[in-house]
Amino acid sequence: MQVSVKLFGALRQFLPAGSQFNACHLTVDDDAHLTDVLLQLPIPDSKPYLVLLNDTKLDRHLYAETAILATDEIVLLPPIKGG
């Protein structure tokens, strides 16, 4: 199945070739989990980011157990600092 993934800010540089602006479609197995999707993106472990699944923020410890559907929208955001 294909899932929609959007990367914002400095994370856009890690989109696969052929992506449009900040979005791509990744092919995963029908029984894929969020970790399977994220492993397809070459984001270094040292690069922090937040993951939203259908507008809900997920904690990192839930990635491996979160099943993905073709209708899901996955958004990766760099952390935002302010003051």
Image (tube, helix red, strand yellow):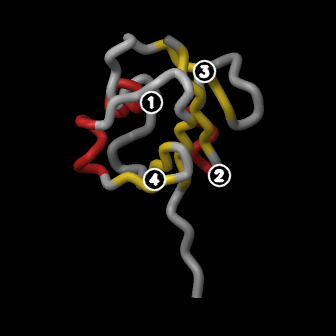
Lateral position of residue 23 relative to residue 56, left or right: right
Q: Secondary structure at mark 3?
A: strand
Q: In 3D space, how far apart are the residues under numbered discs 3 and 1 (Cα atoms)?
A: 15 Å
Q: In 3D space, how far apart are the residues under numbered discs 2 and 4 (Cα atoms)?
A: 10 Å
Residue at the spot x=31%, y=36% of the render?
66
Q: In 3D space, how far apart are the residues under numbered discs 4 and 1 (Cα atoms)?
A: 13 Å
Lateral position of residue 9 relative to residue 70, left or right: right
Q: In 3D space, how far apart are the residues under numbered discs 2 and 3 (Cα atoms)?
A: 18 Å
Q: Position of residue 29 (x, y in %)?
A: 38, 11
* Amino acid type indicated by mark 4: Tyr
Looking at marks 4 and 1 on the same chain, the residue that comes earlier in the sequence is marked by 1
Judging by the rendered image, the residue that carries numbered circle 4 is: 49
Quarter of the image where one finds residue 18: top right
Alpha-carbon neighbours of circle 2 within 10 Å: few (<14), some, or many (≥20)?
Answer: few
Lateral position of residue 43 relative to residue 16, left or right: left
* Amino acid type indicated by mark 2: Gly
Q: Position of residue 78 (x, y in %)?
A: 53, 56
Judging by the rendered image, the residue that carries numbered circle 1 is: 42
Judging by the rendered image, the residue that carries numbered circle 2 is: 9
Q: Nearer the viewer, residue 33 or 38?
A: 33
Alpha-carbon neighbours of circle 3 within 10 Å: few (<14), some, or many (≥20)?
Answer: some
Quarter of the image where one finds residue 37: top left
Q: Secondary structure at mark 4?
A: loop
Q: Secondary structure at mark 1?
A: loop
Alpha-carbon neighbours of circle 1 within 10 Å: few (<14), some, or many (≥20)?
Answer: few
Residue 25 is tagged as 3
Quarter of the image where one finds residue 2: top right
Residue at the spot x=36%, y=33% of the render?
34
Q: In 3D space, how far apart are the residues under numbered discs 3 and 4 (Cα atoms)?
A: 19 Å
Looking at marks 3 and 1 on the same chain, the residue that comes earlier in the sequence is marked by 3
